[in-house]
Image: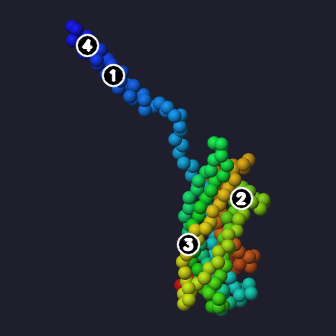
Amino acid sequence: MKRFFLLMIYTFLFSISLTACETAKDINLFNTKKEKPKPCPVIKILKDAKKITSFKNNEAKDISGIMFEAEIIGYSGKCEYKKRDKLETEIVIELEVLLDLFRGPANNTNSATLGFFIAIPNFFPNPEGKKVFYKSITFPKGLGKIRMIDRDIIIRIPITNRIVDSDRVIFLGLNLTKNQLDYNRKTNSQLQLEM
C-alpha cells in the first residue's frame, strides 16, 4: 500500500513537472515580442520611363543622331524599418538597378550621363516625393553595348503623419525630358540600337 501511495505521488509530481515544462515555453521572461518583418513597399517601373534615347542637340531626326540609349531591365532591393524610441521613423530602401546601355553613332566621347528617378505618389505635390539620381557612364573602347548594375540608390522615406507601408507604391524610371518622353510614346518605347 505504501508503495502504491508513493507511486501515485511520483506519478502526480512527474505529470506536474511535464505540464510545467510545457507551460514554460509559453512564458516569456524578458517580455520580448518576435515581430514578423514588414514587407517592403511595392516598386514599379513606369512603362513610358523604362527606356531613354538621347539625341545630339536633343533633336530626334534619325538614328545617326543618337548619343546613347538605355533601358531598365530590372531591379532588386531590400528595405528596413528604422525605429527611434520604439516608433518607426523611416523606411530605408536599398535598390540595385540593372541596365542595358547602347552607345550611339553620334557619341564620340564614349560617355553618357543618365538620370533615374524615384517617385512616391503619397508625397505629391511636395518636392520630397521625387528624387533624381545621376550616373556617369563610360563605354569601354570598342564596345557599343554594356550591361551594368547601379548599386548606389538609397531611398529614405520618413514616416510622420503620412502612412507609408507595404501597400504604397514607389515608381522607378529614367529621368526624361518632354521630347524624350514624347519620343518613347511615339516609338512605343522600342530601342533603336538594340542588338
Pointer 1: what residue? 15
Q: Residue at x 36, y 21 (%)?
A: 16
- The secondary element bearing badge 3 is classed as strand
Snapshot quadrant of residue 120: bottom right
Marked residue nearer the N-terminal end (1 or 2)? 1
Q: CA distance from mark 1 to mark 3?
A: 61 Å
Q: Disc 3 or disc 4, which is closer to the eye?
A: 4
Marked residue nearer the N-terminal end (4 or 1)? 4
Q: Is residue 5 left or right of residue 195?
A: left
Vertical position of residue 11 compared to residue 40: above or below: above
Q: Along the line of sight, which residue is nearer the eye, 47 or 41?
A: 41
Give coordinates of residue 171: x percent, y percent. 66, 63
Amino acid type, label 2: Pro
Pointer 4: what residue? 6
Marked residue nearer the N-terminal end (3 or 2)? 2
Marked residue nearer the N-terminal end (3 or 4)? 4
Q: CA distance from mark 3 to mark 4?
A: 74 Å
Q: Disc 4 or disc 2, which is closer to the eye?
A: 4
Marked residue nearer the N-terminal end (1 or 3)? 1
- The secondary element bearing badge 1 is classed as helix
Q: Quadrant of the N terminus?
A: top left
Q: CA distance from mark 4 to mark 2?
A: 74 Å
Snapshot quadrant of residue 105: bottom right
Q: Disc 1 or disc 2, which is closer to the eye?
A: 1
Marked residue nearer the N-terminal end (4 or 2)? 4
